[in-house]
Amino acid sequence: MTAADSRGGGPEPEGLHRPARAAVLAGCTAACLVVALVGVPRERAGLPAVAREALRVAEPHWHIDEPVNEVVYGTRGFDTFGETFLLLAAVVSVTTLTRRRENRADEGGEQGEQDAGRREQAEVDPSPGVDADESQARSAEAAEQSETPASRGTTYPDDERLGSPGPERADAMSVVTRTAARTAAPMLAVAGVYLAAEGYSPGGGFPAGAVMLGVILLLWAGFGHERLGRAVRPQPLESLELAGAIAIIAIEALGLAIKGSVSANWLPLARSPTTILSGGVLQAFSGSELVEVSTGLTLAVFSLIAMRHDWAPDEEDEGDDRDAAEAAA
């Protein structure tokens, strides 16, 4: 309790932190936005060189009518290659940081990291009743992890009586939300595949992969982790992501080996520019990227969702607690 609280005046309002620095940063950001807006090319402005090159080669060389896809997967295909594997590196980092604790051998046999952490914390702070909030949080976390739909007694909120006391314990959402998810998910999935398959419209594997992740998250929000977890598992997703990455490497490497240039087309082109087979390696690259990006994003997001939280207080929090206890005393 602070001195202001003891006088009955309530907590003191928190002051501004470095207002001058914040004002300078905000002013610089606003100035950059104004300069960028003023410098936007008008409708009669000349096209950049890369845009002119894309328009020149899109239809005769790639048989596609969409120059954006030609730039992303053709003229600047090596840049897209690097961005894709930058995403792969980020996914590997997230899954590594959020992985479950592994059992490690010690002198007493197999000792899990979680048990070792609890033993170390007990040695540092042997008083069991010092932090009641921490103990309550740990109990709630353990209870939540051990719960199943059967132990909660309900799977859907529709099974509970209206106005029932207590928190919502259902594993999924209401019948209205589940029906809406069933209806919207197939249409969104088709739209995502269309973005990657049709080379004569703007799109590609990157945005299509993000759309597929949105479909999975929509189903997860509507039906819950218990049902979706049977389909979304790390092992098959990691295998699919690896297959997509290998396919991208093979497509780019074969262009270098056969045609002498990365991203060069070495596949036969369809005669009509407005077909799925038009574009050659552009379409193959886009389809492989759809697999790699959708599985990678799904792995990263669900690794964060399934990550266990460490409820142990930080050293700074412990110091604040001690200061508060001394002030109250």
Image (cartoon, rainbow, N blue to C red):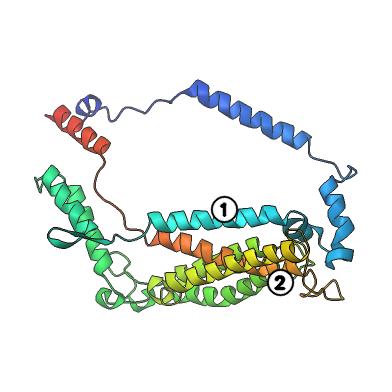
The residue where tag 1 is placed is 86
Is 198 left or right of 6, judged from the image as shown? right
Q: Residue furthest top?
A: 20
**Viewer-side label of 1, 2:** 1
* 236 versus 94 height, above or below: below
Q: Position of residue 89 (x, y in %)?
A: 51, 55
Q: Position of residue 326 (x, y in %)?
A: 14, 29
The residue nearer to you, when weighing 109 against 174, is: 109
Which residue is depicted at the point 37% across and 28% down?
14
Q: Quadrant of the N terminus?
A: top left
Which residue is depicted at the point 62% across and 31% down?
29
Which residue is depicted at the point 62% across and 69% down?
247
The residue where tag 2 is placed is 197
The residue nearer to you, when weighing 103 against 137, is: 103
Q: Quadrant of residue 27?
A: top right
Of mark 1 and mark 2, the one earlier in the sequence is 1
Is 158 left or right of 119, judged from the image as shown? right
Mark 2 falls on what kind of element? helix
The residue nearer to you, when weighing 305 against 326, is: 305
Q: Quadrant of residue 287?
A: bottom right
Is 32 left or right of 319, judged from the image as shown? right
Q: Quadrant of the C terminus?
A: top left
Please rate how many residues cluster around mark 2, counting C-alpha atoms within 10 Å: few if below 14, some from 14 to 19, many from 20: many
Q: Position of residue 36 (x, y in %)?
A: 73, 35
The residue nearer to you, when weighing 271 against 220, is: 271
What is the three-letter code of the residue carrying label 2? Ala
Is 226 left or right of 323, judged from the image as shown? right
Q: Position of residue 39 (x, y in %)?
A: 78, 35
What is the three-letter code of the residue carrying label 1? Leu
Residue 130 visible in the displayed image: no
Which residue is depicted at the point 21% across and 56% down?
138
